[in-house]
Amino acid sequence: MVKSFIFILVVVAVVGFSISTYIFAQNDILSNFSISSETKTIDNKKLIDDIDTCLGQNLVGGSITINSFNNNMLTMLKQEAIDADSQQEIQEIRDKFNQLVNCDL
């Protein structure tokens, strides 16, 4: 009885592994995920760098803010960019950034 249980367990494991290998070989899920993840990270980093550049242009002497409203807006946009989960959110934040702020990038 114990030998048959072990045999059935091994067969189920081999068949399950074979089926999952076949399914994942047919669907290129992992490579699509990594590409979209890398694109999101690159776009997100670029947006955050642009916001940081604009924040730097909004300072006098490196510590005094010229326009506090502008500074607060940029800080909020930066936090939104950090928290963004999708490419669409990043694009919406970039659109807001381009409409509301006039910076030399």
Image (cartoon, grey):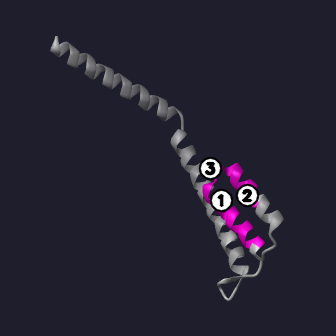
The residue sitting at 69% across, 75% down in the picture is 55
85 drawn magenta: yes
The residues bearing labels 2 and 3 have C-alpha atoms spaced at a distance of 12 Å
Residue at (16%, 15%) from the top-left corner?
2
Task: Estimate the x, y position of residue 19 in percent, counting from the top left.
Answer: 42, 25
Using residue 21 as the reference point, say whether residue 101 is left or right of it: right
Badges 2 and 3: C-beta atoms under 8 Å apart? no
**Residue in the image at 56% along x and 45% along y:** 33
Name the kind of residue labelled 2 in the image.
Answer: Ile
Is residue 39 left or right of 89 when viewed as pictured? Answer: left
Identify the image quadrant of the C terminus. Answer: bottom right
Which amino acid does the dot numbered 3 rest on? Asp
**Residue 101: percent from the left, percent from the top?**
80, 69
In this view, the residue farthest toward the top is 1
Name the side, left or right, on which 3 lies relative to 43. left
Q: Which residue is mark 1?
A: 81
Majority secondary structure of the magenta segment? helix
Please state which of residues 102 and 76 is positioned toward the viewer in this rendering: 76
Per the image, the residue denoted by label 3 is 85
